[in-house]
Every structure is written in structure tokens, then in C-alpha cells.
Amino acid sequence: MSKVYVAVIHYPAYDKNRKIIATSVTNIELHDIARSCMTFDIDLCYIVTPLSKQREIMERLIEHWNRGYGSVYNPLRGIALDKIKIIGSFDEVISEVKRNGEPVIIGTSSIERREKAIGYKTLRNWIEREERPFLILFGTGWGLTDETVKMCDKVLIPIKGRGSYNHLSLRVAFGIVLDRIFGERGGKDE
């Protein structure tokens, strides 16, 4: 099975007017994403933000849980946060992942991208038989930019609920996507 990395892209991201922005990284995001990465055996999750102050705050938070009082209070949280790496740019992510081979880049989107669409089960099967690493991208704000999507080899089909509202929080979508790909019951391609 391939190595699997994920990246949460805080920049570049769209705002509601399709302006390119940097979104905020949150404390709860790191904790929830780290736990999901542990649950689904993700090799590493990159949190991508060019904002140095946000990187500094998040690195201090991780340090607290890995080596500070948090490591005594709740050691399991520090172990989960070892799955997180705060990084300044998407280009840096690509460079790091390429150390293990040319990655297959998979995007996520709430918009159907028919020309690049791939289902969860199909992706799971591909990961199981491929030797190259996989990098799964998650957008923040109003999603991955068109430029980022163009870099993707495939884009997962969107999560669809019963309702017409289609704007899940990052943490919820992250967990659903990983479960559909790596969960015990395997994905479905619908």
C-alpha cells in the first residue's frame, strides 16, 4: 500500500466572492484532524499557511502537547499531534512528499468536477495497488482554487447529504472523506 499524506490548504483558498485569501488555522482543527489521521493511519498531515504568526502559534500548541504540561496531562493527544506538520506553502508540501516518489494528487471539492472525478472505493483500490505516494488535498474557506485543482490528478466526488445546503466544516468533511476511503467498510463510488 502507498504512503498517504493529506494537506489542509489555508492558502490559497477562495472566500465567498472567489477572491484568493489565507484562512485562519484553529486550535480545534489541529486536534480533530490529528485524531482523524491517527484513526485512519495517515502518514502525515500538512497544515499549509503562509502566515508566520499562525504557524508559530500552532507550533507552540503542538509543543505544549508533545513536550510541555500537555504531554503529562494527556499523552495520547501529543502522539496524535505528531501526525501534523505546519508548513508555509503548497510547493513545500510537494517537495517533501516527492522525497518518497512522484505523488498522485487527489483534490476534494463540494463542486462536482466530472472531468477529474474519482469515487472513494476506486481511490481506495488505487492506493492499495500503487507504489507512489498519495497526497489528498482539503480546501478551507470556499475551497481549493482552480489553479490548485488543475494540479490534481483526480478530484473526489463531493459529499452529498439529503439537504440542499452543501458547505460542511473542514473537520467534518475530513473525517467523512477518510472514513469513506480507509474505513473498515470501504468506500462507495456514488
Image (cartoon, grey):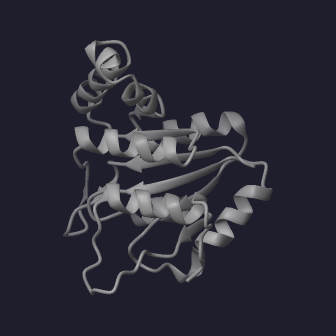
**Relative to 51, 143 lies left or right:** right
* Residue 151 location (% of width, % of height): 55, 59
Indicate whether 97 appears above or below 167.
above
Identify the residue shown where x is 64% and y is 71%: 121
Residue drawn at (36%, 13%), measured in percent from left and top? Answer: 67
Residue 28 visible in the snapshot: yes
Task: Give how far across and how far down residue 12 sits, in percent.
Answer: 34, 52
Image coordinates for residue 51, horizontal then vertical, percent: 26, 35
Up-down: is 98 above or below 15? above
Choose top left, top right, bottom left or bottom right for residue 109.
bottom left
Of the pair 184 and 154, the residue shown nearer to us: 184
- The location of residue 23, given as percent across then percent down, is 24, 49
Q: In the displayed structure, would residue 83 be above or below residue 133?
A: above
Residue placed most toward the observer, 148 or 25: 25
Residue at 33 percent of width and 39 percent of height:
30
Name the side, left or right, on which 63 lies relative to 119.
Answer: left
Is any part of residue 49 visible from this angle?
no
Q: How many marks?
A: 0
Quadrant where the C terminus is found in the figure: bottom right
